Amino acid sequence: MWIRTVALSASLLLVTVGARADQQQIAPGTGQQNSIVIDTGPDGICDTTAASGDLQFATVGSGSPNRTEIRCGANKIVDTIATGDDVQLIAFGAACKSTTTPIVDTGEDGIAQTTAAVDDTQVVTVGIAPANQACVMTGADGVAQTAAPMGDDTQQLVAGAAAPNTAVVLCGPNLVADTTANNLGAGDDVQVVAVGAACAANDVVVDSGANGIASTRAEGPDLRISVAKPAKITIPPDQFAGSRTITFKITNTEFGPAAPLSRTYRITTTSGSCGGGVVSQVDADASTDAPDATATIGIGATMKASLVATMKLQNVTTLATNNPFRCTFDVSVVAVDTDPDVDDAANPEGNTTTVDLEVTDRNDF
């Protein structure tokens, strides 16, 4: 049996930081994004136009959008149909998980227009916008720019300021604080949990101090993988399978005074919608002849990993060559000393990429 193999490149970035990473919540050099600068005041209507750099969360003349308006009642069945621009969150007649489940929100104008039916619970009175909700919020730098509230709107954060003492770094999966406050230079970040001390999941390890600007980067392994490009596989005429080798670029950008000179990692995969037996020859170091279960990469070094995706006729359910079969599976990069955790000091979802396969069967009509 002849199997056609074609190389395909995809980018994969490995960023490692300390041992079993704490988790970054605010980017260094910024304040907390989406902090409320001005709220809608007692009447619930936004009267203030955001200054450049801030986010206009509520449209001027409207309430803060998409506030919970109606919750499910004791029978845990949705009995209410949304009216106006209110949004139906759960279909009429469907079951709710609990009596606290939101089923209708206020829509873009933020004003309730739906009356709860049967035993559903009215949270916001019809014709009313909830008071003191977000009107203007901080933008990308987390610093307030809007100085003068209009109407009965209320200033929550003065212009030029960032929200103080907000979470910069949270406790990571190892439940030990790994990050030293102000490790990027001068700043007033606060060490809430001492380095090396025990902490609970999502405990604040470092906060942003009085000035609200983060000057700390989370330490511990930080594994990231970029989005892989779609891979096309062809099963040639009179053949039973087609394969493709997919390669990944890996870079070690370890950060922190406790960072080791190198980090050992491995590649993990799922079967996804492609089914079992599709992924094989997972190789952590594609520069060697034989597949390696793990590889060690120095700080600043670049390596390549690879795997082979094979699709067989029995896996492909198409009837014509112009109708390709599509499926997906996930690929992750994991530091060996954190395995099976995929610690990421910025965004845990960044450790995994989804590979999209498009398979054409030339044996079809």
Image (tube, rainbow, N blue to C red):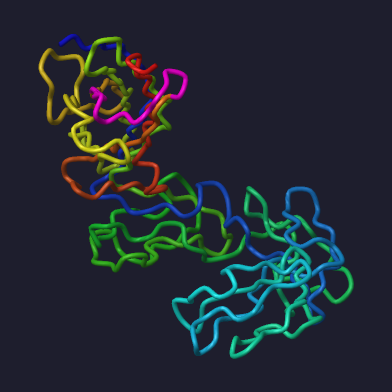
In magenta segment, residue 362: no
Left or right of 310: which side holds 92?
A: right
Vertical order, 281 against 24 (above or below): above
Residue farthest to the front? 365
Locate residue 15: give its quadrant: top left
Left or right of 136: which side holds 281?
A: left
Q: Which residue is at 30% across, 20% downward?
A: 247
Viewer-side residue, 226 vs 118: 118
On-image quarter of the C terminus: top left
Question: Where residue 160 sits in the image (x, y, percent)?
Answer: 71, 57
Viewer-side residue, 44 vs 338: 44
Left or right of 59: which side holds 296?
A: left
Question: Where residue 220 sits in the image (x, y, percent)?
Answer: 29, 47
Question: Where residue 323 sits in the image (x, y, percent)?
Answer: 45, 24
Left or right of 268: which side holds 138?
A: right
Locate residue 238: give its quadrant: top left
Q: Which residue is at 25% across, 43% downward?
A: 258
Locate residue 303: give its quadrant: top left
Vertical order, 248 against 143 (above or below): above
Viewer-side residue, 78 vs 107: 78
On-image quarter of the N terminus: top left
Q: Which residue is at 36% across, 18% downward?
A: 364
Please provide the residue range marked out in magenta.
308-323
Question: Where residue 239 sits in the image (x, y, percent)?
Answer: 23, 13
